[in-house]
């Protein structure tokens, strides 16, 4: 079983005093671009990172955030935007839960925050099962992914994923060996009436390096964090300007980038949560692409 994140909370609380992000009240219009099928496919793949032989994960329980390192007035702005954006795409939200599942840490030194968290839990809550069904259901985080988290950037994030086993199903596990590099989860349902066994997001950890957000407004930052929390996109991807994920380029804030979730962002989130989880990543991505294109009238 995964230990509840009291250790993480202790580390975060020890980081130091609250920080204040300078922001102005400027707002900007968003230019909506007509996207080609190829652009939609590329963007969908970027927002649904998945390891080989695993499903695309998403929230299947209410999102409950906790913000550390900020004055409460600024924490509330982030939480309010996340709640509003979750409602926009019909994702359950619980502001008063006993156990948060989205940890947002603001600091003037994101490298130091990640280093402390990594020292406390070197596996970053990966390779574990949050339900006790099996202790071998997920891969540990790769060295490449860990190195990416060490890279200096305004916002970095990672998630913990677990297997949710349906009633009446059993889980078998095919380990790695000379014939294969990645272990595989196999399930057997005794009833078609049960919910499918699926991988789902259990926790998301977001680290904000306030000193690197430039002239970004609180609203834009909060919306950016919202998309990260709800979709957990690929951190290594350079997103196109039709998504709020394009707000940072090469570690620098782009003042001409979107300030709110764009029509594509909203359609993509809705498509992710409307797609069937118990299918291959490619099948699910194809379903998402078709839903997004239909939402744009094509």
Image (spheres, rainbow, N blue to C red):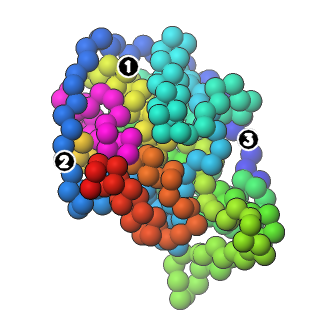
- Considering only vertical position in the picture, is 122 above or below 266? below
Q: Which circle, 1 or 2, is nearer the viewer?
A: 2
SS category of the residue bearing label 2 = loop
Residue bearing mark 2:
34
SS category of the residue bearing label 1 = helix
User: Residue 200: which quarter of the image?
Assistant: bottom right
Depth check, front residue: 88 or 226: 88
Label 3 neighbour load within 10 Å: few <14, some 14-19, many 20+: few
Left or right: where does residue 292 sit relative to residue 182?
left
Q: Position of residue 82 (x, y in %)?
A: 49, 29
Bounds of the magenta span? Answer: 243-267
Label 1 neighbour load within 10 Å: few <14, some 14-19, many 20+: many
Q: Which circle, 1 or 3, is nearer the viewer?
A: 1
Label 2 neighbour load within 10 Å: few <14, some 14-19, many 20+: few
Magenta-drawn stretch contains 246: yes
Q: Position of residue 225 (x, y in %)?
A: 43, 33
Depth check, front residue: 192 or 251: 192
Instruction: Identify which residue is drawn at 31% across, 39% down.
Output: 263
Q: Position of residue 50 (x, y in %)?
A: 47, 62
Residue bearing mark 3:
4
Left or right: where does residue 163 sit relative to residue 257?
right
- The answer to which of marks 2 and 3 sits earlier in the sequence is 3
């Amino acid at each position: 079983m995964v230990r509840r994140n009291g250790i993480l909370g202790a580390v975060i609380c020890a980081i130091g005093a609250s920080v204040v992000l300078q922001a102005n009240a400027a707002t900007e219009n968003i230019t909506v671009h007509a996207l080609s099928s190829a652009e939609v496919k590329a963007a969908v793949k970027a927002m649904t990172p998945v390891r080989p032989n695993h499903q695309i994960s998403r929230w299947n329980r209410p999102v409950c955030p906790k913000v550390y390192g900020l004055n409460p007035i600024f924490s509330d702005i982030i939480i309010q935007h996340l709640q509003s954006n979750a409602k926009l795409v019909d994702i359950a939200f619980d502001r008063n839960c006993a156990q948060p599942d989205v940890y947002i840490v603001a600091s003037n030194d994101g490298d130091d925050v990640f280093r402390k968290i990594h020292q406390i839990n070197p596996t970053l809550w990966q390779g574990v099962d949050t339900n006790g069904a099996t202790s071998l259901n997920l891969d540990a985080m790769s060295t490449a992914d860990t190195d990416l988290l060490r890279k200096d950037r305004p916002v970095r994030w990672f998630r913990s994923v677990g297997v949710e086993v349906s009633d009446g199903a059993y889980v078998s596990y095919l380990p790695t060996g000379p014939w294969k590099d990645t272990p595989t989860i196999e399930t057997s349902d005794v009833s078609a009436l049960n919910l499918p066994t699926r991988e789902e997001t259990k926790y998301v950890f977001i680290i904000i390096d306030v000193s690197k957000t430039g002239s970004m407004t609180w609203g834009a930052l909060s919306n950016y964090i919202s998309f990260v929390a709800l979709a957990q996109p690929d951190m290594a991807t350079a997103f196109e300007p039709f998504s709020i994920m394009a707000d940072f380029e090469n570690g620098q804030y782009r003042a001409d980038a979107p300030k709110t979730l764009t029509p594509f962002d909203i359609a993509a989130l809705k498509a992710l949560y409307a797609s069937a989880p118990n299918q291959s990543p490619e099948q699910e991505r194809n379903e998402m692409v078709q839903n997004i294109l239909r939402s744009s009238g094509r």
